[in-house]
Image (cartoon, rainbow, N blue to C red):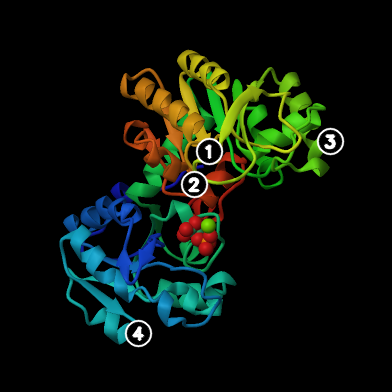
Amino acid sequence: MAWKTLDDMDLGGKRVLVRVDINVPMDNGVVTDATRIERIVPTIKDILAAGGSPILLAHFGRPKGKPVPEMSLKPLVPALEAAFGVAVTFIERPSHDEIFGLPQDAVVLIENTRFSPMEEANDPQMSGFLSTLGDIYCNDAFSAAHRAHASTAGVAELMPACAGRLMQAELSALEGALATPQRPVVAVVGGAKVSSKLELLGNLVAKVDHLVIGGGMANTFLAAQGINVGKSLCEHDMTDTALEILEKAKAANCEVILPTDIVVSAEFKAGAANETVAADACPEDKMILDAGPATVAKIASVFDGAKTLIWNGPLGAFEIEPFNAATDAAAAKAAELSKAGKLISVAGGGDTVAALNGADAAKDFTYISTAGGAFLEWMEGKTLPGVAALDQ
Ligand code: 3PG
Ligand code: MG
């Protein structure tokens, strides 16, 4: 695929509709994690520097096609102004008169695109109207690019379109990690359920050299091999699927790394009494909450031999101590190798980034994606409508 960037556009004196993802965590009207806002700053600054005026299109939450006051974008204005260093004009209902009457150097934020049912329906009436508000469309919302909505996909077909700086960075990091990677490549996939990451695992075994499976989904793989997992989270109805994935991996020469030792406890609670046992020795009345040190040592040695790492999902119940130990140790190892320039590491997904931040490892990763669902779909090998629409 080939898409244009801001460098290919003549931005001087133009109104640029910029689709951004500022769906950030908020508490009582205050932004609690501004990462997604900080990451769009280069795009806004570059447009302003070239003499263009950015008009931001964005969603917040899932208001389901009608105005929901708690999901207004207005409370985000101070955080945007702080990040951009310029005033931001908020417009609730855009009209041509209002938009065309603004000064050349204005930065505009339009109210939550999802307040209209036409957004998620990708209704041509909405994309048509949006396209009349500006001269150029710039998509900087990789993390919303898995949605085929009016402001992410529809409008891109109607105007000269390009990728923003964050979109460029996300695409090149992901391409580097999975499409044209330096080998060996290792993928870490964790999380609760095999069923939610089935397509991901199926796609990855054909593309990577080592696949580390962690979290609840590892239990399903252990159980599929006839191992008793006690009270652990486990999808027993996924046995055949898990075995098929292992077969597919074998055929593709992909080494699958499952826990060889496990940390078990009688309850899912922070600080719960626990012990480390062999992977096939989970007591009947206990549950697996983390991978053990031997498994972590194996993962570390795989990281040592790898050139590229792509990570989605924690290895254990990282949200309750001490069951974050395996995730933290593996994250620290990846961070150390990345910092030393020995490993290209790319991670994405809300839980994953929270886990890596908890381990203080994220800052040394080569690239941390702002995307959750879109990161997953990209790893699954799917075409993202918002990215496809830029291919003109
Ligand atoms: C996200 O936060 O994952 C993106 O903003 C997409 O939001 P959505 O899952 O509601 O489409
Ligand atoms: Mg989502």
The mark nearer the N terminus, 1 or 3, is 3
Look at the picture and state if 76 lies above or below 252.
below
- Res 349 seen here: no
Residue marked by disc 3: 240
Q: Residue at x 33, y 52 (%)?
A: 35
Amino acid type of disc 4?
Ser
Amino acid type of disc 1?
Pro
Q: Is residue 183 left or right of residue 6?
A: right
Q: Nearer the viewer, mark 1 or mark 4?
A: 1
Residue marked by disc 1: 314
Amino acid type of disc 2?
Asp
State the mark number for residue 351: 2
Q: Badges 1 and 3: C-beta atoms under 8 Å apart?
A: no
Decide if ligand 2 comes within 8 Å of the CB at mark 3: no
Q: CA distance from mark 1 to mark 4?
A: 46 Å
State the mark number for residue 95: 4
Q: Position of residue 369 (x, y in %)?
A: 42, 43
Q: CA distance from mark 1 to mark 2?
A: 7 Å
Q: CA distance from mark 4 to mark 2?
A: 39 Å
The mark nearer the N terminus, 1 or 2, is 1
Q: Nearer the viewer, residue 228 or 389?
A: 228
The mark nearer the N terminus, 1 or 4, is 4
Q: Badges 4 and 2: C-beta atoms under 8 Å apart?
A: no
